[in-house]
Image: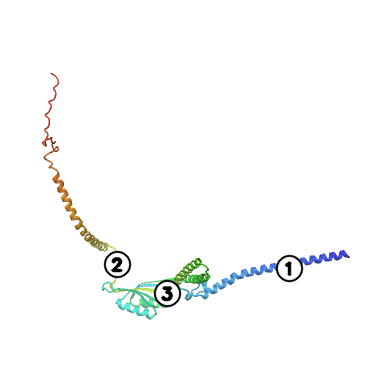
């Protein structure tokens, strides 16, 4: 009887241990599953938030869902129009740009009758770019048109992110500066704050520059008179063109040579004339000291004790040999 009770108690204990083990395993499995689910859900949530930020931000990159009017695009146009009256066309272009909400960024004109031309740099709002281009082409006969676009949406988004990060860095540096406890820390943190503020200012300047280029497009229009030659016409080749170019180079060389001669002439007069007289005087002095070459062909005779010339000894007769 006692043995049955012991075996029954042992079986109950074994059953309780088994139940506890199964419960622990299931709890561990649920914990792992929940953590795995959280790990899998976190990137999805972050990706969704990133997509929402990109779509909400102006000019953001939202992939195919981003419309063209939300992108940051720089428009640049170059055109050449031949007109009857260059000044009148330039005035009309200025009026049209002002009416469109833009302004004239540059104005360069040549009023000569043979080569009358005006080169205008116009800044117009981006949404009025195409209309102003067509209006300028209607002032005369359009000879050349070139339109270039540059999509800077990625640059704008990158600058926005970098500006936000840099502002946070500046704020953190300022907080650390307020908590500085020594002079060394104060100087170091002040330098760090100054550096971060300078970087932030540079990023903001780039952002303003891109905003200006995207908000106002640039049009460079050249109005030519009836007889004005284009840049391509002025590059003719041939004998006459080469002769004209060579003659122009020759005249330029002559002018340069005369300029150099005029610059050197005062120095030549001040230095050269005294030098010429000095050389002439030395030549005459040397001529006085040197005897004429025909008087003593073999050199001057030796001088005796009395100052007179020494006579040469009489010749010795040659000895005769034999009877």
Scheme by which the image is coloured: rainbow
Closer to the eye: label 3 or 2: 3
Q: Residue at x 31, y 78 (%)?
A: 88
Q: Position of residue 101 (x, y in %)?
A: 39, 80
In the rendered image, which residue does mark 1 sit on?
23
Q: At 66% across and 68% down in the image, what residue appears?
A: 33
Query: Gap between marks 1 and 2, in whole Å?
Result: 95 Å
Query: Relative to the observer, which residue lies in front, 135 or 294?
Result: 294
> N-terminal of the two: label 1 or label 2?
1
Coordinates of residue 147 in the picture (x, y in percent) = 40, 72
Taking 294 as reference, is 227 above or below it? below
Question: Could you tell me if the residues under marks 3 and 1 are in contact, i.e. CB atoms within 8 Å?
Answer: no
Tell me the number on the disc at residue 212: 3
Q: Quote the CA–CA distance across marks 3 and 1.
A: 67 Å
* Residue positioned 78% across, 67% down in the render: 16
Q: Residues within 10 Å of mark 2 (few under 14, many from 20)?
A: few
Tag 1's secondary structure? helix
| Furthest residue in direction bottom, as rendered | 99
Q: Quadrant of the C terminus?
A: top left
Assess whether mark 2 and mark 1 are in contact (beta carbons under 8 angstroms).
no
Query: Label 2 belongs to which residue?
Result: 234
Q: Residues within 10 Å of mark 3 (few under 14, many from 20)?
A: few
Give the Cα distance between marks 3 and 2.
36 Å
Location of residue 111 (image quadrant) = bottom left
Left or right of residue 263, residue 48 in this image: right
Nearer-N-terminus badge (3/1) = 1
């Amino acid at each position: 009887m006692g043995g049955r009770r012991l075996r029954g108690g042992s079986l109950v204990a074994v059953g309780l241990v088994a139940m506890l083990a199964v419960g622990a395993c299931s709890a561990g499995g649920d914990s792992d599953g929940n953590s795995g689910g959280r790990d899998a859900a976190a990137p999805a949530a972050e990706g969704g938030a990133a997509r929402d930020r990109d779509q909400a931000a102006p000019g953001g990159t939202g992939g195919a869902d981003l419309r063209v009017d939300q992108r940051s695009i720089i428009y640049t146009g170059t055109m050449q129009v031949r007109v009857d009256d260059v000044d009148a066309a330039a005035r009309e272009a200025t009026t049209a740009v002002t009416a469109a909400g833009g302004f004239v960024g540059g104005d360069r004109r040549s009023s000569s009758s043979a080569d009358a031309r005006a080169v205008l740099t116009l800044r117009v709002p981006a949404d009025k770019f195409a209309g102003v281009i067509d209006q300028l082409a209607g002032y005369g006969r359009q000879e050349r048109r070139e339109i270039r676009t540059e999509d800077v949406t990625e640059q704008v988004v990158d600058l926005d992110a970098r500006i936000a990060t840099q502002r946070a860095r500046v704020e953190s540096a300022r907080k650390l500066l307020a908590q500085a406890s020594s002079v060394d820390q104060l100087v170091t943190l002040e330098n760090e704050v100054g550096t971060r503020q300078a970087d932030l200012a540079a990023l903001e300047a780039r952002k303003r520059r891109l905003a200006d280029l995207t908000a106002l497009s640039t049009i460079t229009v050249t109005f030519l008179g009836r007889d004005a030659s284009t840049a391509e016409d002025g590059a003719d080749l041939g004998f006459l063109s080469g002769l004209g170019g060579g003659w122009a180079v020759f005249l330029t060389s002559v002018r340069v040579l005369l300029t150099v001669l005029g610059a050197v002439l005062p120095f030549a007069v001040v230095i050269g004339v005294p030098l010429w007289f000095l050389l002439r005087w030395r030549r005459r002095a040397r001529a006085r000291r040197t005897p004429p070459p025909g008087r003593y062909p073999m050199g001057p005779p030796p001088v005796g004790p009395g100052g007179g010339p020494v006579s040469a000894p009489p010749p010795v007769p040659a000895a005769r040999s034999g009877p």
